[in-house]
Image (cartoon, grey):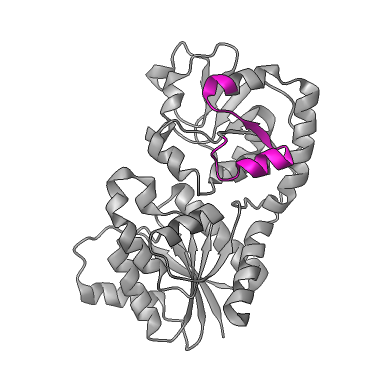
Amino acid sequence: MRAYITNINGIGGTAQTAQNMIADIAEKYFGIRPMGIYHYDWPQEPAEVRDGRMDGIIAPLQANDLVILQMPTWQPNEWTQALLNHMALYGVHVIIFIHDIMSQMVPEWADQLAGEIGVYNRAELIITHSQQMLDFLHDHGLTVKKTAILGIMDHPTKMDLGPLPTYQPVMTYAGPNDPKAAFIQAWDSNDVKLRIYDQPHDWGKDKNIDFIGWHEDAELLIDLRRNAGFGLVWSDVPYWNNYMKMNSSFKLSTYLAAGIPVIAKPTLTQAQMIKDHHLGILANDMHDAQQQVLAMSPEEYHQMVVDIDRFATNIREGNYTKRAFTNAFYKLFNN
């Protein structure tokens, strides 16, 4: 039996980065071979063209092989069902690794949940970000019994990131301004600086905001460690806050890999983890968060980053992904 993992390309951004990292860990530590899926937009693609494309994707498969399907494929549910139909012809085992539930990310996609559940129910085993995500899926029709939990996204790196961070009354948002980060434009603190990895915008003029621009991963980790102060895993948009109760934000693991404290709401999926391991600040609103940052002493900050540096070893080594895969393989073939 050989094992494969799908790996999205051509879509860019965090969605691709997260899948690529999981596929890299799977290949490096478990010998699982990547199965590339290139993202494209062709709603009227003829069935015979689509079928030929899918035959190419699954060409290496043999009977009883294992395929880990990373979801979403960023294609319609019907496309993903067709891909699974092609795989089924070989009698393969299927694990579905759920990064994001698309119907819960955008209000306009909410009617796609049943289709997503239909895809997930094709798997023998499901890997989810959290127990909360798994409970949500079971409440909405998931019938798969074998499951494994990731817990938190990894962010592997072998870089020497340099000295531990030192206290700065600064908050950093590792991403551009977008609808779920509307709080950025309302920034009104003169005492806490906001840093954003985006190009300058007119609405930021005369505000205590620095626009940092886009950074490659290696540059991002170093810049966060040196200059970020605290990393924001934050939104005030109701639908996104609701989603953050069950997913694992890639921003969270990026901040922790860089070694800086995070700022999040008590409803975040990993809020208890943050509290238990002294990984940052939990706040109900942005004013509360700003006041906690200003009240923190350099000594308290130092102790926090020492604790984070210890905790982040697992994230930098990809250990949460390794654990999830190990649990999944054991359950798949031994229960």
Question: What quarter of the picture does the C terminus occupy?
Answer: bottom right
Residue sticking out furthest to the bottom: 63
Residue drawn 36% across and 59% down?
39
Relative placement, left or right, of 13 versus 312 is: left
Answer whether residue 200 is visible to the viewer in this image. no
What are the residue bounds of the magenta stretch? 266-288
- Residue 269 in picture, x, y percent from top left: 56, 45
Up the image or down, 146 lies above or below 38; here it is: below
Location of residue 47 (image quadrant): bottom left
Which residue is found at the position 48% from the left and 18% from the top?
187
Q: Indicate yes or no whether the magenta region holds residue 242.
A: no
- Residue displayed at 37% across by 75% down: 84
Residue at the (22%, 60%) spot, across then down: 43
Q: Is residue 120 above or below residue 253?
A: below
Q: Position of residue 189 (x, y in %)?
A: 53, 14
Q: Quadrant of residue 267?
A: top right
**Residue 188 point in image, percent of width and height:** 49, 14
Q: Magenta stretch containing residue 281, yes or no?
A: yes
| Closest to the observer, 132 or 251 | 132
Residue 250 appears in the rendering: yes
What x and y, as percent, mark residue 29? 67, 68
Q: Nearer the viewer, residue 313 or 204?
A: 313
